[in-house]
Image (cartoon, rainbow, N blue to C red):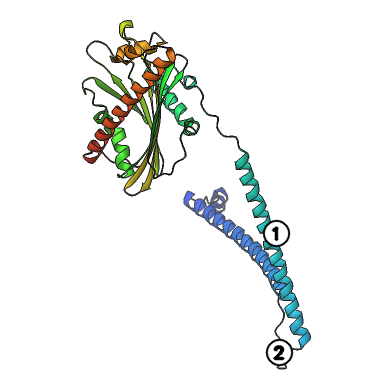
Amino acid sequence: MSSNAASSDASPPVDSPNVVQRRQYFREKQRKHRHRRRMDRDEIAALQTELAALELQQRTRTTPPSTSLMPLSWEIISSIFRQSSSVSLATQKELLAQVAANKATLAEIQQFLASCAHVPRVYSWGQLYRHATLPAVPDARRRAKEWLTLQMYHNMDRIWQQFPLVAADDTFQHADVQFDGPCINVVQHEQLLLPFPLPRVVSLLRHRLNSLWQFDPNELRMETASNTRYYSLHNNVAPDPSWNSLGAYFAEADRCVMVFRRVQGDEMHASTPATLRTAHALEWKELRRVSATQTSMRSFCVMSQRSVDDRFLSVDEIVRAHGWDELDDLVEPSEAAKRQSLRAMLLTKVADAESRMGERFLQVITTDAAPLWRP
């Protein structure tokens, strides 16, 4: 009786957590194995179907080899030739059609390029002049400098329409004085073949510009942000906004584009009314690698006379400002005669300045120790 009661009161055995976890692991492994076998069977069936189709295609495209030792009849030989000739003619027809299509496409592209309207020339440089004043807020100041230089960069192709067609290894220099209403512009075209590698020329124009300008280092300040550099001239009295220059550099594989422009105002360094005189100047430079030791540099620059209180100086005021007395010798001091004399004097001054700048450039670049530019 006691043994039966004990057996009836006993609880069913309970598996330990490790046993349950092990059983679940093996069930999951078996499930994955069955799934993988089903996938393998499906893949094998698909491959077998593809193999059968390829074998059938091969049998239909190839002629079974002849087991006879007898020579082939002329009917078989002629049929093989006819079949091969038909295939060759069909291939030739496809190739001729492709060549004709390519020629037609090429002709359409050439016609499209010939019919494209040229970028309109700039008939009035005053249209490009915009009074630019840099804000004092740092973020707005940075964006303003980027916008001003990017605007010039994106108008580069329009500007090069003004440049004569010359080869990359030719040398060309031309300056002119143009009268546009009250505005007097000095327009310069220049292309030089420099016997120096591209990285050295770019490094000089990026890092040692003041070696060419020769301003007092204590009066010249420079701000660098991203690819822009802003140069402002200061003295002990007040800043001179008529010279402040903003530049940017756009590098490519074998080319570097540089743009420079004058900035007419700067909120960070306000000018007094007595010294508030401004000028406009826009310059584009394109440097290309001609060889490992030669660089082609073409430049286009347009610069106006100074203005005071947004009024351009007259011919007489320009002459007095430069201390020239040639106008006093004119027999008939008409406006046309004054302009002609002023044009000759300005061109002489520009030629002298370019000569001095060229000598400085060669002197500095031969002793340049600035870091080399890398595209």
- 288 left or right, relative to 53: left
* Disc 1 packing (10 Å; few <14; some 14–19; many ≥20): few
Residue for point 41% across, 16% down: 337
- For marks 2 and 1, the one nearer the N-term is 2
Q: Amino acid at mark 2?
A: Thr
Determine if residue 300 is in view. yes
- Residue farthest to the right? 75
Q: Which of these two is toward me, 275 or 249?
A: 275
What count of labels does the image hold? 2
SS at circle 1:
helix
| Residue lying farthest to the top in this orientation | 273
Of residue 68 and residue 166, the one placed in the foreground of this image is 166
Q: Is residue 238 above or below residue 282?
A: above
The one nearer the camera, 80 or 321, is 321
Residue placed most toward the observer, 313 or 91 = 313
The secondary structure type at the circle numbered 2 is loop
Q: Position of residue 359 (x, y in %)?
A: 25, 34
The picture quadrant where one finds residue 118 is top right
Residue drawn at the location 40% of the way across and 41% of the way down: 255
CA gap between label 2 and label 1 equals: 41 Å
Please name the residue shown 38% across and 47% down the image: 290
Looking at the picture, which amino acid does disc 1 mark? Answer: Ala
The crowd level at tag 2 (other Cα within 10 Å; few <14, some 14-19, many 20+) is: few
Above or below, 30 against 193 in this view is below
* Quarter of the view holding residue 200: top left
- Percent across and percent down for residue 356 are 26, 30
Residue assigned mark 2: 67
Left or right: 233, with 95 as reference point: left
The residue identified by callout 1 is: 97
On the image, the x and y values in percent for residue 40 come to 61, 63
